[in-house]
Every structure is written in C-alpha cells, then in structure tokens.
Image (cartoon, rainbow, N blue to C red):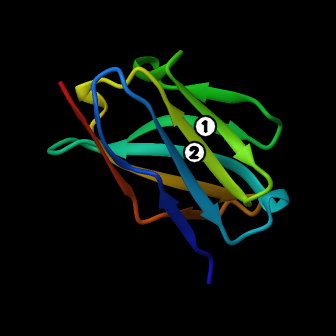
C-alpha cells in the first residue's frame, strides 16, 4: 500500500510563508515525477509545481518566483515552500507522484488559507 501524507498547511496572512511536506512510502529512485496541485473552493484542481527525476522543475505562472518545489531526501519527501502568499493561493494542496511505471498516487491534501 503506497501512502503519501501531506503536512504543513495552515492559516497565514497575505505576504506570509508556509512550508508543505509530503512524505512518500516509495523509494524516491522509483519516482519519475513529483508534483503539487491545489484546489480552491468551487474550482478545479490545478497543477502548481513539478519536479522531475532529472532535477528539472516547472511552475504554474501564478506561483512562479514565489513557490519552490524540492526533494527532501532525508525524510523521503517532496517539499513545497510557499512565499509571498496571496489570498488567491487559498485551497487544498495535494501532492502527486508518478512512478517509472507511470502509476500515479495522490495524498489526502492539506489546507492552506491566506487572509488579506
């Protein structure tokens, strides 16, 4: 049973920062792509940031320059640092991994709330 467990969500004021973590019960060497997604109330889930096994990263335009995705080898996790948060960053943040065998796994999500 593969498990992804997100943590680190919370409530902050605009301009603040949060660090999210997603612990993964798979060897990181078996993962092709790790990503973070978010879903705001009443909206569809959207891709926020991607980290490939090659080290390449990609960010959605609204978060580019403010969010950073990284691999946490010590904790076997993928992290997302959220800086200069805005109210429209509010939502449930989910991590996703795609294995080398192209199987996808999702975490249960962690809530991020940014007040103005």
Mark 1 closeness class: few <14, some 14–19, many ≥20 residues within 10 Å: many
Residue at the far bottom: name it.
1
Residue 87 rendering spot, x and y as whole percentages: 23, 27
Residue that numbered label 1 is attached to:
50
Closest to the observer: 55 or 67? 67
Please determine whether, in this image, residue 16 is positioned above or below residue 65. below
**Quick one: SS at disc 2?**
strand
**Quick one: SS at disc 1?**
strand
Q: Quadrant of residue 75?
A: bottom right
Left or right position of 74 against 58: right
* Residue 114 in sight: yes
Residue 103 rendering spot, x and y as whole percentages: 64, 65
* Residue 45 in sight: no
Left or right position of 88 against 72: left
Q: Residue at x 56, y 52 (%)?
A: 21
Residue 83 rendering spot, x and y as whole percentages: 47, 25
Q: Residue at x 74, y 60 (%)?
A: 76
Left or right position of 1 against 39: right
Which label number is shown at residue 23? none
Q: Which numbered disc, 2 or 1, marks the residue that appears first in the sequence?
A: 2
Residue that numbered label 2 is attached to:
35
Q: Are marks 2 and 1 in contact (CB under 8 Å)?
A: yes
Left or right position of 93 against 23: left
Q: Residue at x 80, y 53 (%)?
A: 73
Mark 2 closeness class: few <14, some 14–19, many ≥20 residues within 10 Å: many
Q: Residue at x 39, y 50 (%)?
A: 9
User: In which quadrant is the N terminus drawn?
Assistant: bottom right
Residue 20 rendering spot, x and y as whole percentages: 51, 47
């Amino acid at each position: 049973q593969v498990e992804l467990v997100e943590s680190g969500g919370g409530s902050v004021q605009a301009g603040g920062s949060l660090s999210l973590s997603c612990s993964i019960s798979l060897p990181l060497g078996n993962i092709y792509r790790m990503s973070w997604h978010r879903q705001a109330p009443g909206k569809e889930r959207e891709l926020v940031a991607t980290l490939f096994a090659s080290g390449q990263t990609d960010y959605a335009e609204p978060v580019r320059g403010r969010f950073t995705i990284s691999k946490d080898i010590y904790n076997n996790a993928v992290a997302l640092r959220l800086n200069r948060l805005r109210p429209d960053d509010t939502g449930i943040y989910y991590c996703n991994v795609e294995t080398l065998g192209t199987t996808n796994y999702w975490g249960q999500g962690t809530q991020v709330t940014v007040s103005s």
